Image (cartoon, rainbow, N blue to C red):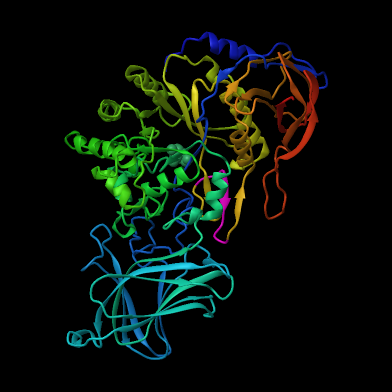
Amino acid sequence: MSLPRVSRVGLFAALCALSVGAVADTDPITLRVNVGEPGKPISADLMGVFFEDLNHAGDGGLYAELIQNRSFEFRATEQPTWNNLSFWTVTPLGGAKGSMRVEQAWPLHPKNPNYATLEVQEPAGEGVKMLNAGFQDGISVQSGEHYNLAFFTRQLYVGKRWDARKAEGALPLVVRLETPNGEVLAETKFGIADREWQRLTATFTPSRSEPQARLVFLATALGGLAFDEVSLFPQKTFRGRPNGLRADLAQTIADLKPRFLRFPGGCIVHGNGLGNMYRWQDTVGPIEQRRQQANLWGYHQTVGLGYFEFFQFAEDIGAKPLPVVPAGVCCQNSDHQGGTGQRGLPLESMEDYIQEVLDLIEYANGPATSKWGAVRAAAGHPEPFNLKYLGVGNEDHITFLFQKRFEMIYDAVKAKHPEITVIGTVGPFHSGDDFDQGWKIANEFSIPIVDEHYYVSPQWFWDNLNRYDTYDRTKSKVYLGEYAAHDEKRRTTLRAALAEAAHLTSLERNADVVLMASYAPLLGREGMTNWNPNLIYFNGTGGVFPTVSYEVQKLFGHHGGDRYLSSSLSADSQRLAISSVRDTASGEVILKVVNGGDQAKALKIQLDGANRLASKAELIVLSGQPDDTNDYSAGHLIKPKTSSIGVAASFAYTAPANSLSIVRIKKGK
Ligand code: AHR
């Protein structure tokens, strides 16, 4: 990017944040806030969330499915030790003989080619047992809760395999939830006579809680059965949605009050090679008809959590949906090529690809009578999802190959859907060649918003608090789509969280340029992470562990305000960042003070132009030691504490060492 001209607004804001002369930490610094002015608008969509299925954030995470490899599509191309029967075992019991294999002759759907067969060659005892133990540490079930079992099955033959054509009748099948020792927690029985695929369902209510339950199928009679899309869901999903989300995790995300939800990533958008790009049409419709694929983070995407579920989740939490589609190129790191693996869809296929992007807009916003609106309606949502933003490309290497395809997509969307705001990409880093080239394209095409990414040290954030003060207000706006402070060993410390808080004060100050921001990544399953830090950790037994950074995101999400009030500090102080906003609806003034230093900082706060303010304000403080991390096993948690503080047109406040303080001042009577 060529150096932007410093606008008047930017210069003013920059001056507010700059040094005036250093003073000792013990001398009070005067913070003057102009509460008499209307203030500068803050983007209503500033605080959002970024979702990507890495760290098992989706499969084995937010997506509430409890069965791993439910449709026998796991492959060695995903992990060298995997095959179609991974996470399933077969055990003949009490002298029975039988086997399980994977077949493709008569699939449930062409996009879901593999299914399992279970054959009993010699019936005896309890029969032949086919078992799935879920993700990593078993299937956690709770007493008193209900679990929905669903699976596709058909009879292959009755009796001996090659004598079977004449034999008829139902094959008995027992399905159970069991403990690792074989204790039965819940059981149901079926008789399978149909030779066509049929979907069978049952509800399990386990007799007791068990963190490591297994789903067991017992075939007892001579014959063969086929199985596919074997699913077990807690009945209590978020908002009770079928094929829904884990309620505790979804609620933790909703509690952030995100204004937008970005999905499905991240790098899985552009994918590992052209065949691995995330194509939205493969992820809608009945789950057994979706095209699953390898996740470039080294596991399998069922896409059970697909575009419909993302849109539904966004709506459920009051967030605007922000889908990101590939820009017609795959990831530059595809095929282990370390930056040179970008390939583009053949230009002759771009017309079809562009139609696919336009179809997405119709899927989200078109009437239920339109081709793709009807697909949405068939999934249970006749009303539109009100799509406003569309990301095109993620962190792509900005090459001619990319530019050509981006331009084709961008022009088509602009022409057909001027109501959609396209978000472009400016590479993986806060500066450098891709960043400069990305901004060059943004300026050339007047792209409304571009997506910046940076994962940097806490110190970088403190050193760059003025980054956006000098951005040209007449150029493209910014969506800071991925950011996080990476402390040593990539721990989730208070030090990192406060650096992020300081940066957020600078985003509020510049919310006329930075319209949106999302911390990344969002979720990490303990013991199955590809990436650290994440905003929220979780496990498979109901544990949800928000980090200190989560607390910061939540505080900014809840105390954002809609008008930025100008302010100034009488003296510079290392690691001090402030922001003053107004919430027009309530008339409240909200002050945020981030003290990233090891000494408390005395402030004299002067509210210029104050007219009728309450004499008591709410004070929320997040503080601790810089190395503190939210350690749930030790019960050591950094959480905000709320109290009250006396306020007046001029009042004193001492910001504790290593803290974020929020003072919420109501209107007086
Ligand atoms: O957030 C994790 C990864 O970081 C994203 O997939 C990618 O866009 C970035 O490099």
Q: Is residue 137 above or below residue 320?
A: below
**Does residue 540 belong to the magenta stretch?**
yes
Observer able to see residue 506? yes
Q: Residue at x 59, y 32 (%)?
A: 457
Locate residue 29: give its quadrant: top right
- In the image, taking residue 3 as reference, residue 578 lies left or right, namely right
Q: Nearer the viewer, residue 7 or 488?
A: 7
Observer able to see residue 464? no
Residue found farthest to the right: 26
Q: Quadrant of the C terminus?
A: top right
Q: Is residue 85 above or below residue 277?
A: below
Dominant secondary structure, magenta: loop
Q: Is residue 595 above or below residue 137?
A: above
- In the image, taking residue 557 as reference, residue 56 lies left or right, namely left
- In the image, taking residue 96 as reference, residue 163 lies left or right, namely left
* Residue 106 on image: x %, y %: 21, 68
- In the image, taking residue 356 as reference, residue 549 lies left or right, namely right
Count of marks, rendered view:
0
Image region (quadrant) for ligand 1:
top left
Q: Nearer the viewer, residue 465 or 389?
A: 389
* Residue 246 on image: x %, y %: 51, 55
* Residue 563 on image: x %, y %: 58, 22
Q: Nearer the viewer, residue 358 or 182?
A: 358
Q: Which residues are magenta?
A: 531-541
Q: Nearer the viewer, residue 140 or 608?
A: 608
Q: Residue at x 44, y 22 (%)?
A: 477
